Amino acid sequence: MGMRDFTHLRAIAGLLTGLLLGACASNIPPQIRKAPADNPAVDEVLGDTTGYVSRRVRWGGVILETDNRANTTWVTLLALPLSTSGKPNISDDSPGRFIAEVPVFLDPKVYSKDRRLTVTGTVSGSETRKVGEFPYSYPVVNVEYYYLWPVEPQLPPRYRDAWWYDPWWYDPWWYDPWYPYRYPYRY
Amino acid sequence: MWRIHWFLVALALLAACAAAPTFDSSGVDSALTPQRVAAQLQDARGKRVLWGGVILAITNLSERTDVEVLAYPLDADNRPRRDDDPLGRFIIELAGYLEPASYSEGRLVTVAGTVSRAVPGKIGASDYAYPVVAAQQLYLWPRDSGYDGTSVHFGIGVGIGF
């Protein structure tokens, strides 16, 4: 009888674990979450794109421009360093720019400027475009999997830190002795 | 034994402090502001300056990049103080490519370099002589105005182990 009780408990524990894990599940493709074994960096490829043609890459960054072609969408990105799960970290040390050629239609209102996108695919070549007057040679990636990262609410800097505390903080409305009537002063 | 532990604690605390970059300020005349250089360029040409401010515009040319900056006085870390009165405009000249998506309008920069020349420009209908600084060291300050020199924080966490 005691044994049976334990198996019951174990079943419940298993179910709970399953539920907990289920809550963590995401729709991020595993191809985005895991980088290919040999993943050349954007700045490596920038100098010599032809030498890297057909190499597999996982790159990501913020969208600079989304250009809808007849059957594909060309997304220009400012590459950023990625976390181990493939998410671009907002920072100032960008390894460079690249173009993601996605074989489907992507709505430019959704895939809009400054949104974060990570792609995997193979380097297909390069395209030279002018940035101002500078001829920039963008590596082009033939995209197989892509993931648009959700927008994170941008809080004012002071609230971003959970431990932030302002010792001089004072709100005159914190305690209003005249509530619900108006203050007896004109201002 | 305990001494080592305290040493580690002190090290961790120091590491938590934000580090400001060091600039080569040798031979810099801090009284030389962009406004003064624009007024009397002949005396200023070739002088070393350490200036900073807010980026107004960036122009990528085929072999160099020009960054137009509205100068502000610098604080002890050489970070521009936007709350003070501006000191005039200037142009940072840098060989090669500078990413305009990073060095974008509104960002703060500090530059160490030499005054090379002045270029005539227009602001609206007014003529404006922009002093040009050939950059030797350029620093882009991180985003966010939530800057305080020391940011050391303590937290208490509760964990459950299985």
Image: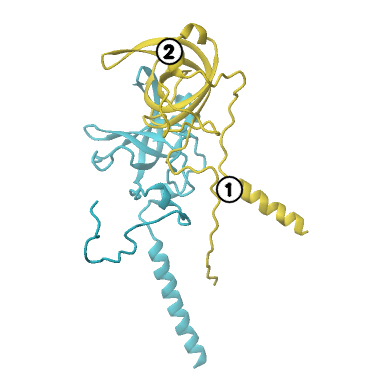
Chain colours: A cyan, B yellow
- The image shows residue A173, relative to residue B22, as above or below, that is below
Residue A99 in the image: state x and y as whole percent.
36, 32
Q: Residue furthest front?
A: A185
In the rendered image, residue A59, in percent from the top left (x then y), is placed at 43, 39
The residue at which mark 2 appears reads as: B38
Residue, far right: B1
Q: Which numbered circle lies on residue B153? A: none
Closer-to-camera residue (B106/B33): B33
Whole-angstrom CA distance, mark 1 to mark 2, is 41 Å
Amino acid type, label 1: Ala
What is the x, y in percent for residue B62? 40, 15
Asked if residue A71 is positioned above or below residue A18 in the image, the reply reads above
| Residue at (42, 41) in percent of width and height | B145
Q: Which residue does the image show at 54% across and 63% down from the upper left? A: B156
Residue B16 image label: 1
Q: Secondary structure at mark 1?
A: helix
> A169 and B159: which one is in front?
A169
Among numbered discs 1 and 2, the one appearing first in the sequence: 1
Asked if residue A162 can be seen in this view, the reply is yes
Q: CB of mark 1 within 8 Å of CB of mark 2?
A: no
Callout 1 environment at 10 Å: few (<14), some (14 to 19), or many (20+)?
few
Q: Secondary structure at mark 2?
A: helix
